[in-house]
Image: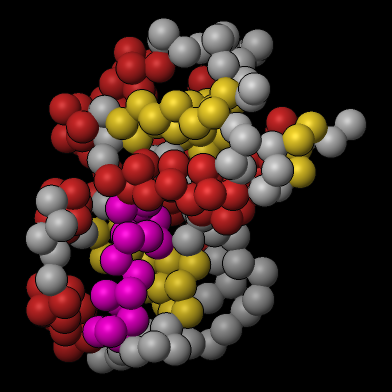
């Protein structure tokens, strides 16, 4: 049986692993959710890389694929891991690349550490739309504990609306934690809110790398 490690520091990794298990029911999913080091994974790209390396050492070279279910790690360290451990396959949650140009402004829900990286600014440059970033590190422990309410979401977004004079109809999720609150975001921002996240694309990437048919876990030679 193929073995896939999912690595993250909180509930976002659990949510991605849940979706991966549902899509690939015959693949063994090993959850390496480093709850105790969640702050280190949010501090900086250097801190995140060091923390991930220590947690993943027991699995490198022993599993078929390691997935970094963390946008900061993927954006800044995926190439590092792939080059350092050439015999181990790695993929990660990448920031969504959107081809269609739209005139409406978009917001990106992110973290401070990711928003400060050069790779993130390069991503913004490539986006075919005007995009504003909201860093919501304070939300992450609340999501982990199931305590983030619609009222809190509404209060934070309202500040942004007043400052920027628009209410967006499109949002990009640049942190796996935010996948779990999509229903809440739609309650606050409207049911027609278009949400871009990385889960489905990453599952397709996993199937491609492992040469399996999505949903079966069967190798496709």
Q: Could you tell me which residue is drawn at 33 percent across and 13 percent down?
A: 54
Q: Could you tell me which residue is drawn at 62 percent across and 79 percent down?
A: 101
Task: Check residue 13 for magenta coloring.
Answer: no
Q: Could you tell me which residue is drawn at 44 percent across and 42 percent down?
A: 17
Query: Does 24 appear above or below 133?
Result: above
Left or right, residue 140 beside residue 30: left
Residue 61 x/y as whole percent: 57, 9
Q: Residue furthest right?
A: 221
Q: Is residue 208 visible?
A: no
Number of numbered discs present? 0
Q: Quadrant of the C terminus?
A: top right
Q: Could you tell me which residue is drawn at 27 percent across and 35 percent down?
A: 9
Left or right, residue 45 beside residue 137: right
Q: Nearer the viewer, residue 120 or 217?
A: 217
Dominant secondary structure of the residues highlighted in magenta in the image: helix
Query: Does 159 appear above or below 116?
Result: below
Q: Is residue 217 visible?
A: yes
Dividing the picture into quadrants, the one containing residue 191 is bottom left
Residue 47 x/y as whole percent: 26, 25
Residue 159 x/y as whole percent: 14, 80
Q: Quadrant of the N terminus?
A: top right
Q: How is the image coloured?
A: secondary structure
Residue 166 x/y as whole percent: 30, 90
Query: Does 173 appear above or below 34?
Result: below
Task: Check residue 187 for magenta coloring.
Answer: yes
Which residues are the magenta region? Answer: 173-189
Dividing the picture into quadrants, the one containing residue 172 is bottom left
Query: Does 174 appear above or below 107?
Result: above
């Amino acid at each position: 049986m193929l073995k896939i490690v999912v690595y993250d520091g909180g509930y976002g990794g659990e949510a991605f692993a849940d979706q991966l298990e549902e899509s690939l029911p015959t693949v063994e999913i090993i959850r390496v959710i480093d709850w105790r080091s969640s702050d280190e994974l949010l501090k900086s790209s250097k801190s995140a890389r060091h923390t991930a390396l220590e947690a993943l050492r027991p699995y490198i070279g022993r599993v078929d694929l390691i997935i970094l279910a963390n946008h900061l790690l993927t954006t800044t360290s995926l190439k590092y891991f792939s080059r350092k451990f050439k015999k181990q396959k790695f993929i990660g949650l990448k920031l969504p690349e959107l081809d269609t140009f739209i005139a409406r402004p978009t917001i990106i829900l992110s973290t401070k550490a990711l928003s400060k990286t050069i790779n993130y600014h390069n991503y913004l440059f490539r986006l075919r739309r005007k995009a504003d970033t909201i860093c919501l590190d304070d939300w992450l422990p609340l999501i982990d504990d199931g305590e983030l309410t619609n009222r809190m979401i509404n209060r934070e977004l309202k500040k942004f609306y007043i400052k920027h004079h628009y209410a967006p109809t499109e949002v990009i999720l640049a942190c796996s934690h935010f996948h779990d609150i999509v229903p809440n975001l739609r309650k606050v921002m409207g049911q027609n809110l278009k949400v871009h996240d990385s889960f489905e694309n990453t599952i397709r990437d996993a199937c491609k790398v492992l040469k399996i048919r999505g949903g079966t876990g069967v190798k496709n030679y």
